[in-house]
Image: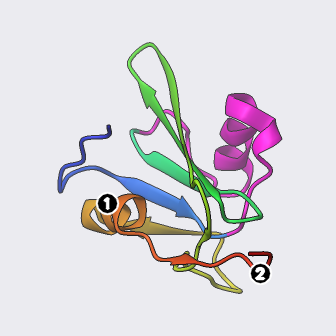
Amino acid sequence: MLYLTAETKILLSIKPVDFRCQIDGLIAVCQREFEENPRSGYLFVFINRSQTMIRILCYESNGYWLATKRLSKGRYASWPSSIKEKSTVLHASDLTKILKDFIVKRDKHV
């Protein structure tokens, strides 16, 4: 369980990420795509291409945390999208809504 406060800094990746890359690959995305230091104190939030999993990367004093949430069925339907932006800053309440009160659209193959 993540505990978020109003002061929690959150950067959400708009573009889906290949989750085979694990921690080192996500660190590279933070540096290359967002031009952010992965040790900056931000929670970096990613989604996979099929929109069934979310990963959160953060650095804490002596190492990285990588949290994953995989939906049992359905897909996230309310992930932000933008042609121009690679990422967006979220408030803790926005991330909480995505993690707990997500909107799930039905799979086409039911």
Mark 1 element type? helix
Considering the image in quadrants, where does the N terminus appear? Answer: top left
- Magenta residue check for 31: yes
Question: Which numbered circle lies on residue 24?
Answer: none
Image quadrant in which you'd find residue 25: top right
Of the numbered discs 2 and 1, the one sitting upstream in the chain is 1
Query: In the displayed image of the protein, which residue is found farthest to the bottom?
Result: 83
Q: Amino acid at mark 2?
A: Lys
Which residues, given as a range, are shown in magenta?
A: 15-40
Q: Amino acid at mark 1?
A: Thr
Q: Position of residue 96 (x, y in %)?
A: 31, 60
Which residue is outermost to the top?
Answer: 62
**In the rendered view, would you say 76 is above or below 35?**
below
Left or right: 77 with respect to 83? left
Which label belongs to residue 108? 2
Q: Is residue 64 above or below residue 15?
A: above
Q: Residue 34 in the image: x percent, y percent?
A: 63, 57
Which residue is labeled 1 in the image?
A: 96
